[in-house]
């Protein structure tokens, strides 16, 4: 049985973020499938900050990762 809400482990998350930081197309660390990318806005422009985040999703195993692009950290 497949867990449809499973997340990547900490080491897997670091590997994905490292691929993005290196300018590579991220591959799922579980099955090697190229991950799809969705941009996510956030923050409040009226308060003087905004966040640019990406949501990387593996179309095969359905695991995903959201991280802050500027900081290179997961959220």
Image: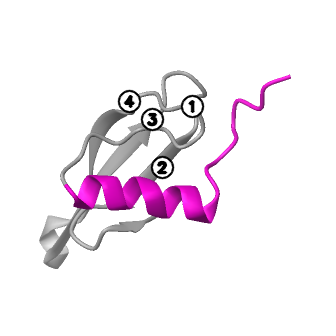
Q: Secondary structure at mark 3?
A: strand
Q: Earlier in the sequence, mark 3 or mark 2?
A: 3
How far apart marks 4 and 2 lie (CA) works out to 13 Å
Contact flag, marks 3 and 4 (Cβ < 8 Å) = no
Q: Earlier in the sequence, mark 1 or mark 2?
A: 1
Can you tell which mark lies on residue 34? 4
57 lies left or right of 51: right
**Residue furthest out toward the right:** 1
- Report the magenta residues as a range: 1-22
How far apart marks 1 and 4 lie (CA) works out to 9 Å
Q: Earlier in the sequence, mark 3 or mark 4?
A: 4
Q: Position of residue 29 (x, y in %)?
A: 53, 43
* Residue annotated with mark 3: 57
The answer to whether residue 37 is above or below residue 71 is: above
Label 4 vs label 2, nearer the camera: 4
Contact flag, marks 3 and 2 (Cβ < 8 Å) = no
The answer to whether residue 21 is above or below residue 47 is: above
Q: Secondary structure at mark 1?
A: loop
Q: Earlier in the sequence, mark 1 or mark 3?
A: 1
Q: Position of residue 71 (x, y in %)?
A: 27, 74
Local packing at callout 2 (Cα closer than 10 Å; few below 14, some 14-19, many 20+) is some
């Amino acid at each position: 049985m497949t867990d449809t809400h499973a997340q990547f482990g900490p080491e897997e998350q670091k590997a994905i973020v490292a691929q993005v930081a290196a300018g590579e197309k991220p591959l799922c660390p579980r099955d090697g499938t190229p991950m799809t990318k969705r941009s996510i806005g956030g923050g409040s422009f009226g308060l003087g900050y905004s966040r640019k985040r990406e949501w990387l999703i593996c179309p095969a195993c359905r695991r995903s990762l959201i991280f802050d692009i500027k900081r290179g950290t997961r959220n």
